[in-house]
Amino acid sequence: MTQSSIEKTLWTDHLTALAYGVDSALVLVLLAVWLFRPRSLTREYK
């Protein structure tokens, strides 16, 4: 790897990557909360 192949990354690129990471983590957390929500045991599914 040469020095010329390393480019400076703008802070906006870091912010975009962070926003995508937070967004996907939030989706996974909400999905887990929905999947593992407490269900009533007295209700029967017909």
Image: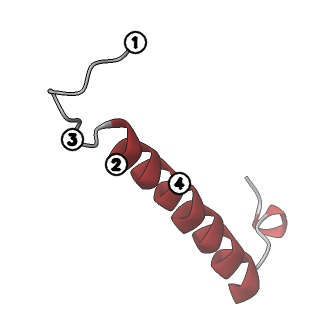
Depth order, front residue of 43/25: 43
Q: Which residue is mark 3?
A: 38
Q: Quadrant of the C terminus?
A: top left
User: Residue 8, position in %: x, y?
Assistant: 76, 79
Q: Nearer the viewer, mark 2 or mark 4?
A: 2
Q: Which residue is mark 4?
A: 27
Residue 9 sits in quarter? bottom right
Label 1 vs 4, first from the N-terminus: 4
Dot 3: element: loop
User: Residue 13, position in %: x, y?
Assistant: 74, 77
Q: Residues within 10 Å of mark 1 (few under 14, many from 20)?
A: few
User: 1 above or below 15?
Assistant: above
User: Residue 11, position in %: x, y?
Assistant: 69, 87
Label 3 vs 1, first from the N-terminus: 3
**How many angstroms separate mark 2 from mark 4 (CA)?**
10 Å
Dot 2: element: helix
Q: How is the image coloured?
A: secondary structure
Depth order, front residue of 35/20: 35
User: Residue 32, position in %: x, y?
Assistant: 37, 43
In the image as oriented, which residue stretches furthest toward the top?
46
Q: Along the horizontal axis of the image, is 10 left or right of 31? A: right
Amino acid at pointer 1: Lys
**How many angstroms separate mark 3 from mark 1 (CA)?**
19 Å
Give the residue drawn at x 73%, y 52%: 1
Q: Nearer the viewer, mark 1 or mark 4?
A: 1
Residue 14 sits in quarter? bottom right
**How many angstroms separate mark 2 from mark 1 (CA)?**
24 Å
Give the residue drawn at x 44%, y 54%: 30
Q: Nearer the viewer, mark 2 or mark 1?
A: 1
Residue 23 sits in quarter? bottom right
Depth order, front residue of 43/26: 43
Give the residue drawn at x 84%, y 68%: 4
